[in-house]
Amino acid sequence: MTVNVDLKYKKPLTGRYNKYVSRCLNCDHEFLRNSKFGTIFDNINGFNESNIGLVAIVECPVCFEKWFYHGYDHYDYFLDAVENGTQKFFGSGSGNVL
């Protein structure tokens, strides 16, 4: 599956692979159970390519640790969060609206 990621959303590959996707490897924050910090899509810092294909780079809203996970099926959800203004790095409240 090929996803054409807009260049403004490409970021350097940061952190390590997280197979748990919605749980921080550092502080164990779990996005699914603590919605006051937003969804996993609200906390995606960007996308990049890796040896496993397209990955989403996430920043934990509690400890600010970054990790990445397979992101090819999450790009559309990320774009929805940007459009809705809930995305922390590219949404209307981020100061990065392009």
Image (spheres, helix red, strand yellow):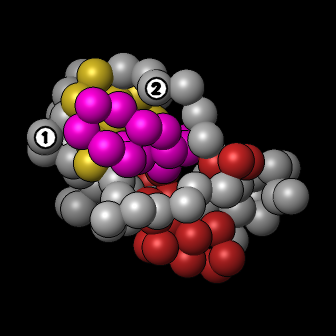
71 on left or right of 85: left
Is tag 2's residue or tag 1's residue first in the polypeptide sequence? 2
Question: Residue, x 61% and y 41% (percent of image)?
Answer: 10
Q: With respect to residue 8, does 72 lie above or below?
A: below
Q: Quadrant of residue 81?
A: bottom right
Q: Within 10 angstroms of label 2, few (less than 14), some, or many (20 or more) residues?
A: some
> Which quadrant holds residue 29?
top left
Q: Please tell me in which quadrant of the rendered image residue 79 appears.
A: bottom right
As drawn, the label of residue 81 is none
Q: Main secondary structure of the magenta part?
A: strand
Q: Secondary structure at mark 2?
A: loop
Residue 77: tell me if it is visible.
yes
Which residue is disc 1 drawn over? 19
Asked whether residue 29 appears in the rendered view, the answer is no
47 on left or right of 25 = right
Identify residue type, mark 1. Lys
Q: Amino acid at mark 2?
A: Leu
Picture coordinates of residue 49 (x, y %)?
Answer: 42, 37
Q: Look at the image and give the residue range highlighted in magenta.
A: 44-57
Q: Residues within 10 Å of mark 1 (few under 14, many from 20)?
A: few
The image shows residue 56 at horizontal and vertical percentages of 41, 46
| Label 2 to label 1: alpha-carbon separation | 16 Å
Residue 73: percent from left, percent from top: 32, 66
Which residue is pictured at 45% across the width and 72% down the height?
77
The residue that label 2 is drawn on is 13
Q: Is 40 a magenta residue?
A: no
Q: Residue at x 58, y 56 (%)?
A: 5
Nearer to the camera, 4 or 67: 4
In percent of width and height, residue 46 lies at 55, 44
Task: Please report the residue visible at 46 percent of the width from the left and 26 percent of the height from the top.
Answer: 13
Location of the C terminus by quadrant is: bottom right
